[in-house]
Image (tube, rainbow, N blue to C red):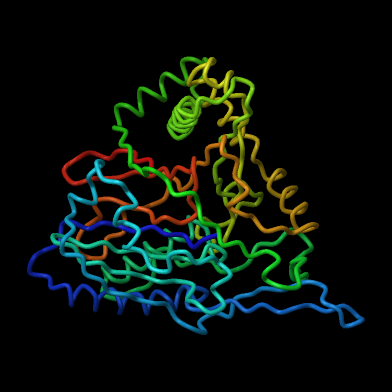
Amino acid sequence: MHYIKNGLLFSNINSSLPADDVVRRLETALSIALLHFPPLAGCFVSEIAYDDEGQPAGMHVFVVCGDRGAEFTRAVAKHITVADVLSPSHDETSFVEAFFPLNGVVNYDGRSLPLLAVQFTELADGFFLACSFNHAVGDGAAYWHFFNAWAEIARNAGAGGLSRPPVHDRWFIDGRENTPLKLPYSHPDEFIERFAPTVLCHEKVFHFSQESIALLKAKANRECGTDSISSFQSISSLVWRSITRARDLPPQQKTICSMAIDNRQRLRPPLSPDYFGNSVDIIEATATAGELLARGLGWGAWLIHQAVAEHTDKAVKEAMTAWMAGPAMYKLSGHDMCDVKMGSSPRFDFYSCDFGWGKPAAVRSGRANRYEGKCDEEFTRAVCRPPELEIN
């Protein structure tokens, strides 16, 4: 997989605050933050494991913490305004991708490249702060935990401790603590994939107002005679059905709506919400194109709701046990062109990232882990507008 790439747009910058001062504050706070998040200042090391006869028998990959440091880049794009970034009329890939460092790299490149790279881009009337974060080190929840911790340190000028220090203790399936995972490969070429998606005609941001979301949720629950369907499930059903309709799939064609789901609070006992690492799975709702479009918004949302409800402690541990018995790499090229994937989460705490000059105007993601049918679902708080949902 590619690095996680998300960034924040800041528009409410005091004109008396020079960009040089902003950069110095960010760099100083980042150095302190890395003391709390040492894996992000480290690098990957891979070792071939050998059997008793000296033949390659697999591979171990681990992180050497604090061994390299993170990368900080300053860029200038004075021809781009905050309004340009917020405008739904432009092609999202036209310039936003340039706001992110380490484009095109995969997680395993963390052997020679930094596990965390930051880019500060100065705009005509604001700036964009982006991170490229190795996905093998942490998931989306870990990413935004780090981003908020960095902002807290900058906001407090380094004084005091973190309100949410990360938990670095590793979680293992019972009885497997002393059994390092051995990948069934003897050379990186056996599992490294440089996935380059088909060039998309357009990549757009769609805004849904709070009122629209409330109406969709009420409609989905009313159609199913329940009050259990969430806003996220209702929006996901809408997107799944809309994309399926636009693809004009045959009625009997199978289509899947998959999404990333956090395991921290589903495990028993639950993990700390501050667990730093990867604790995430993929769940799926499946239907034929014909029944998905014929049965309505609520029916699709209920399928998604059931997939979420069935993802219990037992399901998580069974899936992890099976994967450890036969480890395999997830490949982006394995997606089906009839499916939809919902990424990111409206639960992520984007808008608490106040570095001392106010909260961000919007969040944007880079073109990583993208392919036809991939959607990122995020809450935005655009300038002078109430909170809305954005789907990229």
Residue 216 versus residue 154: which sits nearer the camera? 216
- Vertical placement of 335 versus 338: above or below? below
Query: Could you tell me which quadrant the C terminus lies in?
Result: top left
Would residue 258 be found to the left or right of residue 325 on screen?
left
- Vertical placement of 321 versus 102: above or below? above
Q: Quadrant of residue 126?
A: bottom left
Residue beneath the point at 17% across and 72% down: 19
Q: Residue furthest left?
A: 16
Residue beneath the point at 30% across and 64% down: 129
Would residue 203 be found to the left or right of residue 321 on screen?
left
Instruction: Return the x and y of residue 154 as percentages of the image width and height.
Output: 28, 71
Residue beneath the point at 48% across and 24% down: 245
Q: Residue furthest right?
A: 53
Residue 355 versus residue 336: which sits nearer the camera? 336
Q: Quadrant of residue 149?
A: bottom left
- Vertical placement of 253 versus 374: above or below? above
Instruction: Return the x and y of residue 389 as percentages of the image width and height.
Output: 34, 38
- Vertical placement of 123 versus 113: above or below? above
Query: Could you tell me which quadrant the N terminus lies in?
Result: bottom right
Instruction: Return the x and y of residue 72 as percentages of the image width and height.
Output: 34, 76
| Number of marks drawn | 0
Would residue 101 be found to the left or right of residue 387 on screen?
right
Instruction: Return the x and y of residue 333 as percentages of the image width and height.
Output: 60, 51
Q: Quadrant of residue 70?
A: bottom left
